[in-house]
Image (cartoon, rainbow, N blue to C red):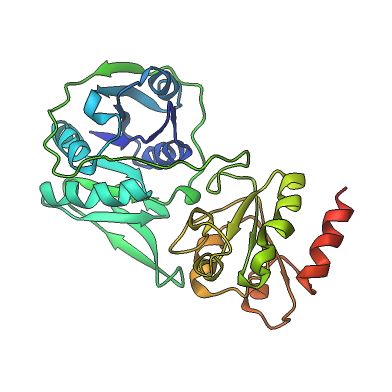
Amino acid sequence: MSVLVLAEVDGKTLKPSTYQAITAATYWGLAIDVLVYGKDLDAALAEASTISGVRQVLRAQADHLQHPLVEDVSDLVMTIASDYNVILTAHSVFGKSLLPGIAARLDTAAITDVIAIEAPSHYVRPSYAGNILAHIDNHEDVQIVSVRSTAFRAAERNGNAQVVAISVPPSRAVSRWISEQLSHSERPELNSARVVIAGGRSLGEQFDSLLNPLAEKLDAAIGATRACVDAGFAANELQVGQTGTIIAPELYIAVGISGAMQHIAGIKDSKVIVAINHDPDAPIFKYADYGLVADLFSALPELNAALQ
């Protein structure tokens, strides 16, 4: 009886979502193994072995896993799936692509985007942009689960797990990796930042000039609404909400954001929400802990000056 957590590696370190997935895995009270796959894994394996609650770290190292494809990782998981009662991963872009295929091959259901677990077989997940919570019972022999990272705290690092090498099947992938373009920023990652300041479409061409100074002073990540991204004022990777990045920072500052349902679904777990909007009836104020009704084009420079 044990749980398999599928880790995700960012360069040479584990993604923060892996720590939160491991915390979710503890709800079963079973032994936890972590599968780490890729090409150059020494640093990630050493890191994984120190995470609290982990029994052993499975090392799956191969050249064709340098840029993992869903088909190859699915084949890898299937070689060891019979040893586990639960297979769990973060509800990330890759996790969402990977898990349904594994569930289909095991002839079971995948329970996705879980925000609460009552082991061994009861789950809670949001539906209709977080407006309702679905309670799901799954009594299959194998539980296939993805968890929303923001719903679980990160596991601590005071463990000493054993690292075990496992064999990797050859690639049978039909798709192939071509290239990637990475954006480099000195700012914190959106999904792990302590502070996030986000702007709506009303900032227009002044999106960067108004938000950047505040973000630097607050050591904050910058986010944007879908409307702002669609209008071309912000990059796609900055999109926050149901169809973008779901976040739960300590402080979320919404500037010129009305508060559409899809956006609220992505930020409602923030510890403190501050809203700045000229419209006193904007829906965002219903969710804000603090609200300022003001013209953002004058309020933001004043706030920036106050933080000098």
Q: Position of residue 89 (x, y in %)?
A: 33, 43
Q: Which residue is at the front of the view, 191 or 295?
A: 295
Residue furthest to the bottom in view is 281
Q: Which residue is at the front of the view, 248 or 98?
A: 98
User: Where on the picture, by quarter, is residue 6?
Assistant: top left
Where 45 sits versus 35, above or below? Answer: above
Say whether residue 188 is left or right of residue 49.
Answer: right
Say whether residue 76 is left or right of residue 286.
Answer: left
Where 114 sits versus 192, above or below? Answer: below
Q: Which residue is at the front of the view, 275 or 12?
A: 12
Q: Position of residue 119 (x, y in %)?
A: 33, 47
Residue 176 visible: yes
Say whether residue 13 is left or right of residue 66.
Answer: right
Name the quarter where the N terminus is drawn: top left
Q: Residue at x 62, y 78 (%)?
A: 283
Where 225 sits versus 68, above or below? Answer: below
Q: Residue at x 85, y 50 (%)?
A: 307
Residue 106 visible: no
Q: Position of residue 59 (x, y in %)?
A: 28, 22
Q: Which residue is at the front of the view, 177 or 80?
A: 177
Q: Position of residue 105 (x, y in %)?
A: 11, 47
Q: How many marks?
A: 0
